[in-house]
Image: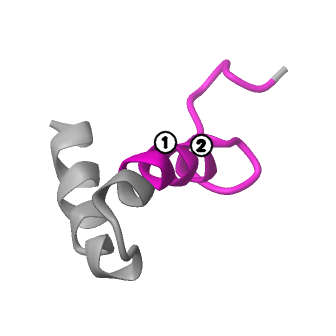
Amino acid sequence: MLWNRWWTLVCELRSACARTRTFLWMAPVWRGWAWHPAHGVRFAGYLA
């Protein structure tokens, strides 16, 4: 469910990339930024 919502939001950024290949390359980059402890999602016990 969380990833479906995330993917929906990322698809709204599709127009930021001129080519589909670029968009599909950038999606995991955006995922990394969203998931990184310093930027986004944090789970109890994830950080020491």
- Relative to residue 20, is residue 2 depicted above or below? above
- The quarter of the picture where residue 48 lies is top right
Does the magenta run of residues contain 44?
yes
Using the image, determine if residue 10 lies above or below residue 43. below
Nearer to us in this view, 14 or 19: 19
**Disc 1 target residue:** 28
Q: Which mark is residue 18?
A: none
Mark 1 nearby-residue class (10 Å; few <14, some 14–19, many ≥20): few
| In-image side of 6 versus 27 (left or right) | left
Side of 26 where 1 appears, left or right: left
Counting from the top left corner in percent of width and height, residue 27 is at 42, 50
Q: Which residues are magenta?
A: 24-47
Magenta run includes residue 8: no
Residue 32 position, x and y percent, is 59, 43
Query: What residue is drawn where x is 62% and y is 52%?
Result: 33
Please report the residue visible at 49 percent of the width from the left and 54 percent of the height from the top.
26
The CA span between labels 2 and 1 is 6 Å
